[in-house]
Structure formats: C-alpha cells, structure tokens
C-alpha cells in the first residue's frame, strides 16, 4: 500500500507517518509539505531516515501535485489549524480559504485521477458557536460542566457533542473552511466514487507538538508554565474554567490504520479523548503547579471571537461502527508533554509561539 500524507512534517502528519510505517509491513509513505510552519523542519530528516519519500510542495498549487507518484490513499493533514485564522492578523481570510479549501480540492482532484481514497482530518470547530454558547452549564471543581437540571439540545449527551449537533453558522472562518471541505469530500465520494473518511478531531496533544496559545493549547500551556512565560485565562470571567478534551495522535493513528484497510463510503466520525480525557485550564494549571511549581496565569475577562466555554466530543459512533476508542489517558499525555518540555526548554521559541 502507498499513502500520501499532506502536511507530513507537521505534528499530526509526522506522527501518522511514524505509526503507519511501524504498523504496516511493506507500506510506502509519500510525504508533501511546504515547511512553512515553524518547527516543521525538525521532522524532515527523521522522517527521511524512516524511509518517507519527501516532496517539498504546497497543496494550494495544483502543479505541485503533478510530480507526485500515484498512491492508494491520501491523508489530508495540512491546514491552517487555528480557530482565529483569518482574523488574527497573521493570516488573511483569502489565505485561509486557499490553504484549507482550495488545498483540499486539489487533493481530491489528485485522488480522482489516481483512483485513491481520501481521509480528511477535520475539526470539532465545525459545530455551531451559537448553539455551543447556549448550552446550559454549571461549575464544578474549577471547570464548567453540563447542567443536568436543564434540557440539552439535540446532539448533546453525557458523552459530549455528537455528529448530529448543529453546524449552523457561525462556526468561525476556520471552521467554515473545514466544513465546506467535508461537504466537498462527500460530493467526490458520491459523484466520483472516491472512498472517503472524515474525522472530526478533538484537541490533539502530545510531545513534539508545535503549540501556540491559539492551537495545541495543552502542549503550549505546559511549555509556557515550565519556562514561566506569561499565561492568561482569557474570557469567561478570567477564571480558566473553559473545558476541552485531549486526543493523542497515536490514538488517531489507530483509526486511520483501520480506515486505510476499509472502503470509506463517506462517513463522518467524531474522534476525541472524550469526557474522561477532558480538563479546564484552571485544572491544567493546578496539575502544572504540582508538577513544576506554582505559576499563576493572568486573569483577563475580555472576550475573543469564536471562544466557547465547553466543548467535548462524543466518539460513541466511532466505537459502535468501528470498535475504535482512545487508549492513551489525559494524564499519560500530560506526562509525555511534561518530559518533552523539561528536555526542550526552548521549544516554544522554535515553534515561534
């Protein structure tokens, strides 16, 4: 089997490449990356030493795909990953759309020509911000939690937000590009019989992640805490009660491994650490204080666009349909990142965070 991974030198793409090489005998990994993300260069030589066939190119340029060998599957792990992209002054809306949507279109056209399957790494941020902000929440142990005394909307249960939760606008410019990419992939599945899997991922976290304050928050928080960088609880009263779940990319790789062996009919699946792997920023700070010594974040009650107080994905559909579930616990993830932070005190500078 031959697999193309776009964004192969990124955190997620490189983790997927390593796992697939280890788990698939005889697999060939073709990697494409424009190396624009700070830190991605550090993965180039290690991947090459594993036998990854690396190509320097940009998925926004269809001509960059013309020299690639045909493969059996494409994993789209290249994206502008920040929910603030297009509004943060670092990326324009046009650049965001070109990268996250035009890039996906070019990869789908490549799949159509190569008769290859397509796996899209999507995001939890395709879910409606207004619907998420209307969720009834209460406070418990320094964290927001769903208030069971009030009715919950369709698509929300004790396990979190499921695939049938609202995706009505607004979802952020970033979320919109990923949502349209999903719809485009499904059209290629229906119109051109391209095998398609769509994975809506929760917050990915692990050692070696290029974390920033807008993306990769678990990794960023630990690295910033240990080096005593300024940290902020932004919005929601400046208390840090907002909650997310964490997923290790090796658990994601387990699902991708399954999908490569299956004909994807165009299924959408939530993949996340779930409620058991969730934590608020205040709880994360308490863990860091115990692990590294005290470092108090600044309270900043100003609101940012697209922020939500609580977002945990329910992956029970993936369990029912494929048997997949995460195996790496949140505390194992935190310990792994902590060891990496201890051994790499200048990591955030390398990532231009």
Image (cartoon, rainbow, N blue to C red):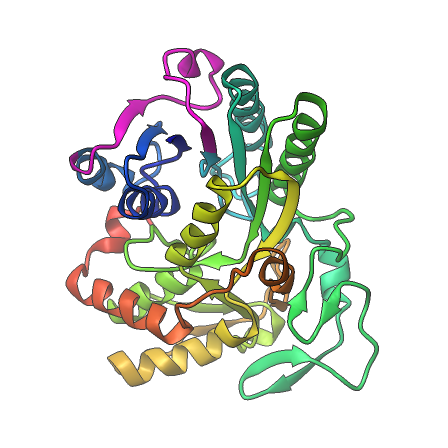
User: Residue drawn at (57%, 56%), measured in percent from left and top?
Assistant: 322
Relative horizontal placement of residue 296, taking residue 130 as reference (left or right): left
Instruction: Decide whether residue 120 is among the magenta residues.
Output: no
Q: How many marks?
A: 0
Residue 28 in view of the camera:
yes
Using the image, determine if residue 31 lies above or below residue 204.
above
User: Residue drawn at (29%, 59%), measured in percent from left and top?
Assistant: 207
Tell me the quadrant of the picture where the N terminus can be found.
top left
- The location of residue 333, given as percent across then percent down, is 35, 68
Instruction: Decide whether residue 61 is among the magenta residues.
Output: yes
- The location of residue 278, given as percent across then percent down, is 51, 73
- The location of residue 80, given as percent across then percent down, is 49, 39
- The location of residue 245, given as percent across then percent down, is 52, 67
Relative horizontal placement of residue 23, taking residue 255 as reference (left or right): left
User: Residue drawn at (53%, 85%), measured in percent from left and top?
Assistant: 142
Using the image, determine if residue 38 lies above or below residue 226.
above
User: Residue drawn at (36%, 21%), measured in percent from left and top?
Assistant: 57
Residue 228 in view of the camera:
no
Is residue 66 or residue 62 the one in the foreground?
Answer: 66
Magenta residues span 49-74
């Amino acid at each position: 089997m031959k697999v193309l991974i776009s964004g192969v030198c990124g955190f997620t793409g490189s983790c997927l490449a390593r796992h697939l090489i280890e788990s698939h005998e005889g697999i060939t990994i073709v990697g494409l990356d424009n190396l624009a993300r700070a830190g991605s260069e550090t993965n180039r030589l290690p991947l090459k030493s594993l036998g990854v066939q690396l190509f320097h190119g940009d998925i926004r340029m269809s001509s960059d795909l013309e020299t690639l060998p045909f493969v059996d599957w494409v994993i789209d792990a290249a994206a502008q990953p920040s929910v603030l992209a297009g509004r943060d002054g670092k990326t324009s809306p046009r650049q965001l759309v070109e990268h996250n949507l035009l890039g996906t279109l070019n990869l789908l056209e490549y799949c159509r020509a190569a008769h290859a399957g397509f796996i899209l790494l999507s995001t939890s941020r395709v879910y409606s911000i207004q619907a998420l902000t209307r969720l009834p929440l209460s406070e418990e142990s320094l964290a927001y939690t769903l208030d069971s005394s009030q009715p919950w909307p369709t698509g929300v249960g004790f396990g979190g937000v499921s695939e049938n939760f609202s995706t009505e606008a607004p979802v952020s410019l970033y979320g919109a590009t990923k949502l349209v990419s999903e719809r485009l992939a499904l059209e290629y599945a229906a119109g051109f019989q391209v095998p398609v899997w769509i994975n809506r991922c929760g917050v990915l976290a692990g050692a070696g992640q290029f974390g920033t304050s807008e993306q990769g928050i678990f990794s960023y928080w630990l690295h910033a805490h240990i080096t005593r960088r300024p940290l902020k609880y932004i919005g929601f009263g400046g208390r840090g009660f907002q909650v997310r779940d964490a997923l290790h990319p090796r658990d994601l790789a387990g699902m991708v491994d399954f999908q490569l062996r299956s004909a994807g009919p165009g299924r959408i699946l939530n993949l996340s650490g779930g409620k058991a792997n969730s934590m608020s920023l205040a709880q994360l700070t308490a863990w860091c204080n115990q692990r590294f010594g005290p470092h108090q974040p600044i309270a900043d009650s100003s609101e940012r666009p697209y922020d939500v107080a609580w977002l945990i994905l329910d992956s029970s559909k993936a369990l029912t349909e494929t048997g997949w579930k995460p195996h790496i616990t949140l505390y194992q993830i935190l310990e792994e990142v902590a060891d990496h932070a201890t051994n790499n005190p200048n990591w955030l500078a390398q990532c231009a965070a």
